[in-house]
Image (tube, helix red, strand yellow):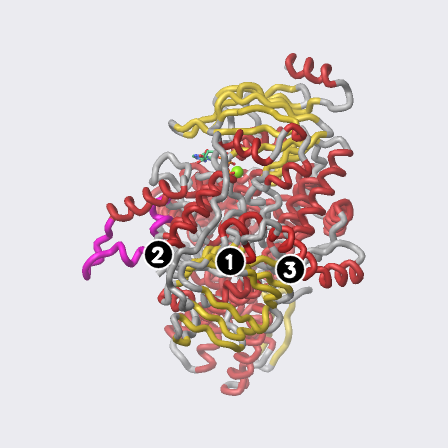
Amino acid sequence: MQQGAQAALKDGAAKPLLVEAIGITKTFGAFTALDDINLMFKGGEIHCLAGENGSGKSTLVKIIAGTYTQDKGTVVINGRSYKELTPAQSMAEGIQVIYQDLSLFEHMTVAENIALGHLREERSALINWQQVRAIAAAQLERIGVRLDLNQELREASISTKQLVAICRALAMNARVLFMDEPTTALSGREVDRLLEVMSELKKAGLAIIFISHKLDEVFRIADVVTVFRDGRKIGDFPSCDLNAKRLSYYMTGKEISYPKYQRISKAQDNFIEIKDLCKKDMYSHINLGIRPGDILGCIGLLGSGRTELALSLFGLNQPDSGKILIEGRETALKSPSASMEAGIALLPEDRSTEGLFLERSVAVNSSASVIGKLSHGILGFFDFVKERTLALSGIERLNIKTTSERKLAGELSGGNQQKVVISKWLATKPRLFIMDNPTVGIDIGSKAEIYEQAQSLARQDMAVLLLSDEIEELTANCSRIAIFAHGQIVEILDEERLKDPAIGSYIAAVVAAGGKQGTAQDTAAAGTYNPKEGRA
Amino acid sequence: MRIERSEGILLGIILIYAVAVALVNPAFLSIETVFDLVRTSSRDLILVMGLLLIMLSGGIDISFMAMALVSSYCATAAMMQLGLSSIGFLLIFAMLIGVVMGLFNALLISWLKLPPFIITLGTMNLFHGLMATLVGTRTFGGGMLPPSFNAFGSGNLIELESEYGIIGLSLSVIPVVLVIVLTWFIIYKTMLGRGIVAIGNSEEAALRLGFRPLLLRLFAYGYIGALAGLAGSIYICQVNAVYPDKMIGEELMVVAGAVIGGTSISGGKGRIFGALLGIIIIYLLKSTLIFLGLSASWNNLFVGIILVLSLSFTAWQEKRRNERHLLFKIESR
Ligand SMILES: Nc1ncnc2c1ncn2[C@@H]1O[C@H](COP(=O)(O)OP(=O)(O)OP(=O)(O)O)[C@@H](O)[C@H]1O
Ligand SMILES: [Mg+2]
């Protein structure tokens, strides 16, 4: 407590010390998630926590929010020290968290989700629905977003949900706001808006703690960056002293670079050929061929039709017209099992809800896609040894941070859960692997590992369709890139074009131009910002 | 009032069915049928309100019929011992005993962290067994019960002359309406109710907002206990006899009613109107078998069919919604 007071004095009144963590240690069984962490969060400052997946960022947040209790150490909030903090105490001190999993109520409306926490904090015994709507409307106004207050949350898109979670935290009079990867599902414009909101909140004197694996966001917004590695603090750095290279070095302890992918396959016939594929309101007249060994990148703004096309290839979104040829034969991909039969696998964008059984072990999860192959004979004896081997090879290849393959998937860190899903699909040895934003929420070291995997599989003649928003990742890993806009392919860049060092800025320009019409319309029509439903 | 699509379909089914029965047997279309339906379904209309709250909290309770039997039986036995005769004592005793059993359920669920279905399956037998060994198993026939029981059970709120004599709307409609209004108030107008809905949606998220699941659960299970006491009392007054083994075995019909009415088995979602419709449709089927000249075993068949249909409808709606949002459950082979 005294330490806290001194530090506050040193810094002067401009940036009051709000939260201080002193010697925080947290273990899960024999595993140390946090080791003697000392940290200070000040009002009027945006503080980023950076570190690899599983380095303990979310665990620290949960301790300060009172959902986990530390084994050793003290949390000092507004000058009061706590050895054991309850969620209620933490909230009463003005601490709010937007969790990685958002923690919203699916069957309630947008308005109620925003207002419920506020009303509960005020200890109101009765509910006045007019007040509920008023609170929600006020918070949405504050961040300049217009949403349908009466929409049931499960009907809402993931980006709407993230905005709701933010409004809920603001409604609860937050003085310290933790945001654990709040931008994973937001599109470029929405991210811009959110960062603007964050700077406004900072001006209002809030302490904002921001966790993100997107380094460009970190550099745009952070005042201070604290780097974690394996549960230990590497250091606090003013963000002006850092650049992407140094930051990733601090995070991983090694230099990260993306090796440029070179297609070496001799095969010239397309594995899959898409001819004049159309689906109303989603995409139209798509012509595309992918050869074995191709890594074909797709980039485009929200609503460009990429994800919709990917889902069609996986039998989940029936096209209206057009043909799909697989190895020259016309094939109807009517269901996921038909697509899997044809050798196609899909890593979906919304992995948290779709890919994992959180209550089951990592081993079960990583072999779930090949379960049929693990049973033998008519009695269907299950091959546990093989299951374990598969899991171990996945853990090894993608560097999944887990104490053992028997750990429950739900106990892994957010990014490591995603790696389990990726390894599960790689286990099917697909001929065409569709990856929809595979590195969202994944730290930069592991990004490189995932792409290395994709590249080495492509060298063994797997075809990859890579949907991503990060130009740098695309240009490094793709042998061709298709630029999408408004449901159409506007340009396909071949290997020769991709050798041009200036190609990155060219792609950025085309993407932005493709989206220009849409942006202009939106702004004119609404005057306010309004996130679109559906995803790119 | 907003009517959900699934509720609209249920209303439609009820209407078409009623017309069909009336075509076979015109005697069906009378106010008497309605009065009769209200009287016989009173017990389950009350119980389903408690069950709705439990299912909103993400739980389930199948011990409520046992609680209804045990509480009304014990309350009657106690009144006979003490020589009390007022209907008020019956209601108060039975509801208190019900609350105690309900709280016991909630505590077990919170401590043992086992699925509520298993726990209430256990306590259902436990409560009944305790009653049989500690209080007894004799039947209290109509002649032995205080006359106030029968007066309440066969009393009417409204009476009409008809060609077959006097027909009336049972007094039990009063507690039914009170319970519906109270449940509506709890669910939609109190923080308590919203908290219960919140833990049913996501207990983790509710905890993080500062809700206390244990307290909310105590309330929900205590509430269905109290309603079980009330419903059991109404039932024994209507039958004008107390048997030590009635009611038990009928709980799943009420659960079916709630589910038919659109209450989600996984918690957090359900509406009063739907749950009421679900019970009404079951009683409508039950009571019209005579009109159609069918045996009682047809009842199970009909209820089964509607249950399967309504579950399929919910699953289909869910699938449609997911498709609209390009969300797909990717199943492995
Ligand atoms: N409830 C739990 N039980 C067991 N281990 C846990 C639990 N919660 C977290 N861990 C472990 O603690 C470590 C740190 O997890 P944490 O979620 O804090 O990582 P993170 O830095 O937020 O990573 P990411 O960037 O992937 O979200 C992980 O290795 C994780 O497996
Ligand atoms: Mg995390």
Q: Chain of mark 1?
A: A
Q: Is B288 situated above or below A242?
A: below
User: Which portion, as a residue range, is magenta?
Assistant: A361-383
Under mark 2, the amino acid is Lys
Image coordinates for residue A266, horizontal then vertical, percent? 37, 61
Q: Which mark is residue A48?
A: none
Q: Are marks 1 and 2 in contact (CB under 8 Å)?
A: no
Q: Position of residue B199 (x, y in %)?
A: 55, 45
Kindly tell me whether residue A283 is visible in this rendering.
Answer: yes
Q: Which residue is mark 2?
A: A429
Q: Do the residues at discs 3 and 1 belong to one chain? A: yes
Let me know if residue A140 is in the magenta part: no
Instruction: Give the answer, above or below, for where A486 lies relative to A231.
Output: below
Q: Position of residue A336 (x, y in %)?
A: 42, 65
Q: Quadrant of the C terminus of chain B?
A: bottom left
Residue tagged 1: A495
Mark linked to residue A533: 3
Q: Is residue B40 above or below residue B187?
A: below
Q: Amino acid at mark 1?
A: Glu
Three-letter amino acid code at disc 3? Glu
Q: Residue at x 35, y 56 (%)?
A: A428
Q: Chain of mark 2?
A: A
Q: Is the distance from the Cβ of mark 1 to the nearest ligand 1 atom less than 8 Å?
A: no
Q: Residue at x 38, y 77 (%)?
A: B295
Name the residue located 47 percent from the left edge and 67 percent from the top edge.
A289
| Disc number lying in front (2 or 3) | 2
